[in-house]
């Protein structure tokens, strides 16, 4: 089915091509890096491969969403009050929203995995005798919680509890909350990691200044991304709530101009952070192959966690 009255502007068509192309390029690079990482073997590269896989999934889902002609699945380029099973094109709207939700879950899963490993490593340093849950167990629990919320959101739409606008609002609120949590956790963990690196530098009598600088850089760029995302989703959510309360729909707030601004800010920042992570992961392997790494002495009671060592050692930025 093709909708003739989608009202997609030329600028919006070009936006889809440009951003879709950017995500497609990210997908190709991530796929190449993932295959190369798998060929290396070892516990450390297993973690890095997981990061590449999540970057690949995120960018691939975004590319698919941008390249699907909106006129083929939706009756309007901007979100509209579409109820499930009641209006033409509701299935296309649902598929489109599922693609967006899935991409967002994959994107935030990258940072959840980072924070989980950071927390595990820090716990080993600050609480050496404490019992530690496997990082992947915590990671899967957190991601499945997000998936459950999104499945519930989809079910409520299909049960006609609210329209597609309601799905959009739930997703915006969820991403705003997760973004705020990520800003807080990245700030806390990065400060503790700087302390750990300075201590390791003193023990091994080597300079950790370059690692500390990279951590600071990652903290600033990561927090900038999440702070921007949180602000964007909060403003977007409150705008939806206010107009929904006054007019019963969001047609007045989601004009082509406002929707275009939202799309550009949201997805351009995603492209930037994905490329940044690709760069960091690549530089991590370059640093790992440098002879200077062998100058580090073994830290007592650390040899049983080689995977975490690879994440922290030169290092830590690998985990973003």
Image: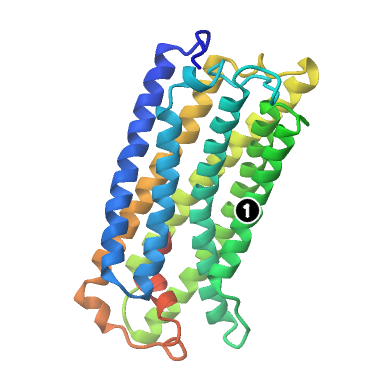
Q: Report the colour scheme.
A: rainbow
Instruction: Name the image quarter holding residue 268.
Output: top left
Left or right placement of residue 144 versus residue 114 in this view: right
Q: Give the number of marks.
A: 1
Rendered location of residue 249, percent (x, y): 72, 18
Q: Which residue is mark 1?
A: 181
Left or right placement of residue 181 versus residue 300 in this view: right
- Between residue 299 and residue 44, name the one nearer to us: 44
Outermost residue to the top: 5
Rendered residue at 32%/66% (across/down): 210
Outermost residue to the bottom: 300
**Badge 1: residue crowd in 10 Å (few <14, some 14–19, many ≥20):** few
- Between residue 195 and residue 26, name the one nearer to us: 26
Instruction: Name the image quarter holding residue 169.
Output: top right
Q: Is residue 255 in view?
A: yes
Rendered location of residue 222, percent (x, y): 47, 51
- Between residue 166 and residue 186, name the one nearer to us: 166
Q: Is residue 217 in view?
A: no
Asked if 219 appears above or below 314 in the picture, the reply is above
Rendered location of residue 257, percent (x, y): 52, 16
Rendered location of residue 90, percent (x, y): 62, 23
For the C terminus, the image quarter is: bottom left
Asked if 140 appears above or below 167 in the picture, the reply is below
Rendered residue at 33%/38% (across/down): 24
Q: Secondary structure at mark 1?
A: helix
Rendered residue at 66%/27% (across/down): 164
Rendered residue at 43%/63% (across/down): 319
Left or right placement of residue 85 versus residue 102 in this view: right
């Amino acid at each position: 089915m093709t909708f003739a009255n989608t009202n997609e502007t030329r600028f919006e068509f070009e936006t889809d091509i440009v951003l879709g192309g950017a995500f497609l390029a990210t997908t190709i690079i991530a796929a190449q890096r993932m295959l190369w990482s798998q060929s290396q073997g070892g516990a450390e590269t297993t973690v890095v491969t997981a990061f590449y896989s999540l970057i690949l999934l995120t960018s691939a889902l975004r590319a698919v969403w941008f390249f699907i002609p909106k006129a083929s699945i939706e009756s309007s380029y901007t979100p509209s009050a579409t109820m499930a099973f009641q209006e033409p094109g509701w299935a296309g709207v649902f598929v489109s929203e599922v693609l967006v939700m899935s991409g967002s879950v994959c994107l935030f899963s990258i940072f959840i995995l980072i924070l989980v490993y950071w927390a595990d490593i820090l716990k080993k340093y600050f609480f050496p005798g404490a019992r530690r849950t496997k990082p992947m167990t915590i990671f899967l629990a957190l991601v499945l919680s997000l998936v459950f919320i999104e499945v519930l959101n989809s079910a409520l739409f299909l049960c006609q509890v609210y329209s597609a606008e309601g799905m959009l609002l739930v997703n915006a609120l969820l991403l705003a909350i997760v973004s705020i949590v990520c800003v807080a956790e990245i700030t806390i963990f990065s400060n503790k990691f700087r302390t750990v690196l300075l201590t390791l530098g003193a023990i091994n009598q080597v300079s950790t200044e370059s690692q500390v600088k990279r951590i600071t850089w990652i903290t600033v760029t990561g927090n900038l991304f999440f702070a921007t995302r949180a602000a964007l989703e909060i403003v977007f959510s409150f705008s939806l709530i206010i107009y929904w309360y006054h007019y019963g729909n969001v047609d007045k707030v989601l004009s082509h101009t406002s929707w275009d601004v939202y799309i550009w800010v949201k997805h351009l920042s995603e492209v930037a952070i994905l490329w940044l992570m690709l760069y960091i992961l690549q530089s991590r392997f370059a640093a790992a192959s440098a002879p200077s790494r062998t100058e580090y002495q073994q830290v007592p009671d650390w040899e049983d966690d080689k995977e975490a060592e690879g994440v922290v050692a030169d290092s830590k930025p690998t985990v973003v």
